[in-house]
Image: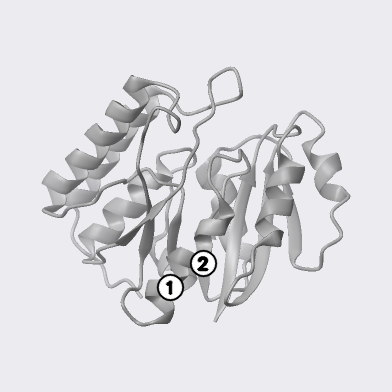
């Protein structure tokens, strides 16, 4: 099994070098590649990525910013692994948790695995951020009669051909809700494992807003009324 770690990047000159190093320093139980998409950064991100020489890393550039969903679409198109997981370059997630996501897959307990964040005072920058995440997750649970703990988690591990078959169209953060909605609609119930998390503040570059939460609710409702398709 080969794992493709997909890293969308936008204006992360202060963190991207550390993010790449942390991802590569993990002792993975599988062959691994790191596919990075610089989504039209206007700072020194592209220059920093151009200096990476590790053979496991491939970098692709968008001439202009298109959004996280679009960056992941480019990464998926160019990935060569059997499974994929998304790892943002903002250092909120710890890549040391990725082997824990792989365990249920490698021992045959699961096909899709989500990393479940346990929010605390040290791991979220605001009360409303946590409440918004809980509201979107609760909506998904009610719409699809399931029990997820963290829909908006970045750590979604699944077969790359399954992701391709879902044809995710959302260009921005809405891709998180679209992925989950389509998985649940087609009876793929994610297996969840606890992960560590440290949210950054707006001043540090946090990008997601309440508008993304509203969009997520709309996408989940849309996916609920659609008929299941034959996903691979």
* Residue 75 coordinates in the image, percent (x, y): 61, 57
Residue receiving disc 1: 103
State the residue in front, 199 or 66: 199
Q: Residue at x 48, y 38 (%)?
A: 172
Query: Quick check: marks 1 and 2 in contact, CB under 8 Å?
Result: yes
Q: Residue at x 40, y 46 (%)?
A: 153
Q: Which mark is residue 205?
A: none
For residue 148, side relative to residue 74 (left or right): left
Query: In the rendered image, is residue 62 in sight?
Result: no
For residue 172, side relative to residue 25 (left or right): left
* Residue 2 coordinates in the image, percent (x, y): 58, 77
Q: Residue at x 62, y 73 (%)?
A: 80
State the residue in front, 70 or 58: 58
* Residue 148 coordinates in the image, percent (x, y): 23, 51
Question: Local crowd at mark 2 within 10 Å, few (<14), some, or many (≥20)?
Answer: some
Q: Label 1 to label 2, Cα distance in Å? A: 6 Å
Residue receiving disc 2: 99
For residue 80, side relative to residue 108 (left or right): right
**In this rendering, is residue 135 above or below 103?**
above
**In this rendering, is residue 76 above or below 120?**
below
């Amino acid at each position: 099994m080969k794992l493709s770690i997909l890293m969308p990047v936008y204006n992360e000159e202060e963190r991207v070098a550390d993010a790449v190093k942390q991802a590569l320093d993990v002792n993975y139980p599988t062959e691994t590649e790191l596919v990075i998409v610089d989504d039209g950064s206007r700072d020194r991100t592209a220059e920093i990525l151009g200096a990476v020489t590790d053979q496991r890393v491939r970098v692709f550039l968008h001439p202009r910013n298109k959004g996280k969903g679009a960056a992941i679409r480019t990464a998926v198109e160019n990935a060569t692994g059997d499974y994929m997981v998304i790892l943002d370059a903002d250092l909120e997630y710890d890549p040391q948790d990725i082997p824990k996501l792989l365990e249920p897959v490698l021992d045959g307990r699961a096909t899709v695995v989500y990393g479940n964040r346990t929010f605390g005072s040290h791991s979220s920058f605001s009360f409303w951020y946590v409440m918004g995440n809980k509201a979107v997750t609760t909506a998904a649970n009610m719409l699809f009669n399931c029990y997820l703990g963290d829909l908006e988690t970045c750590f979604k591990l699944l077969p790359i051909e399954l992701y391709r078959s879902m044809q995710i169209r959302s260009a921005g953060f809405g891709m998180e809700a679209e992925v989950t909605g389509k998985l649940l609609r087609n009876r793929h119930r994610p297996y969840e494992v606890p992960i560590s998390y440290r949210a950054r503040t707006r001043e540090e570059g946090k990008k997601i807003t309440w508008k993304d939460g509203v969009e997520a609710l709309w996408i989940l409702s849309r996916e609920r009324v659609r008929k299941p398709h034959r996903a691979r």
